[in-house]
Image: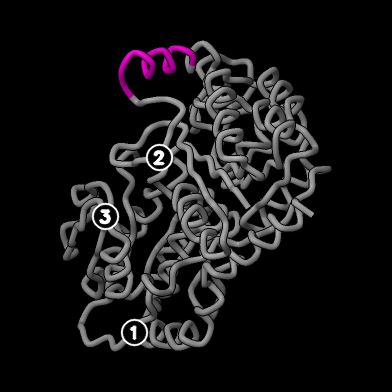
Amino acid sequence: MNILYINTNLYGGGAEKIARVLFKGMQQYGNNTYFMEGKHTKGSDVPYVYPQKGLLGCLNTIVKVLTNNARIRDYRARYLIRKMIKDYDIDIVHFHNIHGNYIGVSDLAYFTKYCHVVWTLHDQWAITAHCAYSIECEKWKTDCAKCPHRNLYPKVFFSDSKKMFERKMQSYSSEIFIITPSKWLYELVNQSALQNNRKMIINNGVDLNCFKFIKKELDHNKIRILFGSNSNRSSYKNIGTVIHALHNLKNKAKFEIHIFGGPLVDSLPKEYEIIEHGKINDENEMASLYAASDVFILPSAAENYSCAILESLSCGTPVMASDVGGNSEIVNEHNGWLFSLNNDDLCSMLDELSFQDILDKNSYISRTYQILDQNKMFEMHEQLYSSLLC
């Protein structure tokens, strides 16, 4: 099979990682795989629709504003992707994130004339007027009128959310095959304009050769807490919940704080020993950090099927995660803790946390982490692709 993967970028967050590992991993089945970025990533050597800079990049930014961050079609994307389909005799185009201002929402239906189209949804964007996650808003179930969250990513510049929603929902084709990584998102899609599309759940997976299980010895005096701090302070990442909990812990002396990503030390009490690891791009380095930590905290206000949770568990490190989205499909009472965002659950959990809790959960993870293997994800994709060509 000849498969073309398309995502906003080659490198970045969870969606980029999944698209990238599929691009490389599906070659083991004898497939010819190709990748196209919506926007060029520095250091990548794959074709792209738009550069980040220069005249064309500037023009694309202007179009972004004029189309309210929600273009319906993009003729440059149509031309370049169609050319790749013809040049490489593509059987399947597999889209991932398309909300990066490089393609129009109606363009997916356009490509069904040339080959099979698969679309993995990494968030709720496909079923809302504009936001990647609706948080507690349910207006997407009707018409998204008078959007109360215009600044949620991806933000809109003009208040016409109802028209945006209608145009988007009318642009879809029943020929697009939908993949959701979580049962949570699958059920939401079944309440949307995509409810009649063929669809299936394929959980994200993790590279067990990189993120290797480590048995906890806990030969140190303090519990090592690890969490990520996004430099842009996205409301979805909800880092404020962790900051609040750390300020209110009764026994701050029993913890050692490890942070990766953006700087955060000035936001935390001075009583803690804080180690900032900065931005980490190397997966082996990230795996070592997970393994050296005792607990990983993910406080997201919204989440689909988190790669970070999978990576932490794969390394043997239990997870404290917010009880949102698909988190409860991965985290349970045996391998971690789920906390509510509506109270001080996280603070209470940390106050009560003991080394024995960590050892018990690490022991359970040692017997179950193999189910996180990304090879299962590859196998399910291969089965899906083959069925589409039958």
Q: Nearer the viewer, mark 3 or mark 2?
A: 2
Mark 3 and mark 2: span between their CA atoms? 22 Å
Q: Nearer the viewer, residue 32 or 213?
A: 32
Mark 1 / mark 3, whichever is N-terminal: 3
> How does the figure colour the protein chain or chains?
one colour
Please give the count of numbered marks on the rendered protein.
3
Specify the amino acid type for callout 1.
Phe
**Crowding near pointer 3: few (<14 within 10 Å), some, many (20+)?**
few
Q: Is residue 59 magenta?
A: yes
In the image, is residue 143 above or below residue 55? below
Answer above or below: position of 115 versus 384: above
CB atoms of marks 1 and 2 within 8 Å: no
Residue 280, labelled with which disc? Answer: 3
The residue that label 2 is drawn on is 46
Q: Which residues are magenta?
A: 53-63
Q: Is residue 253 magenta?
A: no
Q: For numbered disc 1, what is the local secondary structure?
A: helix
* Rendering coords of residue 160 (x, y %): 63, 15
- Nearer to the camera, 210 or 359: 210
Residue 161 in percent (x, y) is at: 64, 21
Q: Is residue 282 visible?
A: yes
CB of mark 1 within 8 Å of CB of mark 3? no
Residue at the image point whose x is 56% and y is 68% from the top: 330
Q: Name the residue that disc number 1 marks.
A: 355
Q: Residue flagged by tag 3: what amino acid is it? A: Ile
In the rendered view, tell whether residue 12 sits above or below residue 276: above
